[in-house]
Amino acid sequence: MEHQELAHAALDLTMIAKALAIAVGSIGPALAIGKIGAKAMESIGRNPEAAGKILTPMLLSAAFAEAVAIYALVIAFSIK
């Protein structure tokens, strides 16, 4: 009976570790993507003619920030 309790406790700790990995790993990218979008909209508002030049670097920056969240997801899946 004690072995089952230990296995259940280990499973609970594993789930907590996975949840923390994805939660902490996605806070930074979420804030970064929000700031990227806000600054891009501010730039376009100040200079609407530059919207085409702003869009590509904005999308690339958002993709790089999103890659960090994907790495956190991979780490969360690899926790056993």
Image: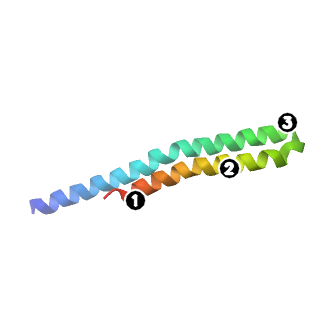
- Mark 2 vs mark 3: in front: 2
Tell me the SS state at disc 1.
helix
Question: Residue tagged by mark 1?
Answer: 77
- Mark 1 vs mark 3: in front: 1
Location of the C terminus (image quadrant) = bottom left
Tell me the SS state at disc 3.
helix
Q: Amino acid at mark 2?
A: Leu
Considering only order in the chain, which callout, 2 or 1, is on the residue closer to the N terminus?
A: 2
Badge 1: how crowded within 10 Å, few (<14), some, or many (20+)? few
Residue 60, image x and y in percent? 68, 49
Question: Residue tagged by mark 3?
Answer: 46
Considering only order in the chain, which callout, 3 or 1, is on the residue closer to the N terminus?
A: 3
Could you give the CA–CA distance between mark 2 and mark 3, rounded to whole angstroms?
Answer: 21 Å
Q: Going by the picture, which residue comes out furthest to the left? A: 1
Considering only order in the chain, which callout, 3 or 2, is on the residue closer to the N terminus?
A: 3
Q: Height in image: 45 above or below 8?
A: above
Q: What residue lies at 9% left-to-right and 63% top-to-bottom?
A: 1
Q: What residue lies at 52% left-to-right and 51% top-to-bottom?
A: 69
Q: Amino acid at mark 3?
A: Arg
Could you give the CA–CA distance between mark 1 and mark 3, rounded to whole angstroms?
Answer: 43 Å
Pointer 1 and pointer 2: residues touching (CB < 8 Å)? no
Tell me the SS state at disc 2.
helix
Specify the quadrant of the image occupied by residue 35. Answer: top right
Q: Going by the picture, which residue comes out furthest to the top? A: 46
Question: Residue tagged by mark 2?
Answer: 60
Q: Is residue 55 left or right of residue 68?
A: right
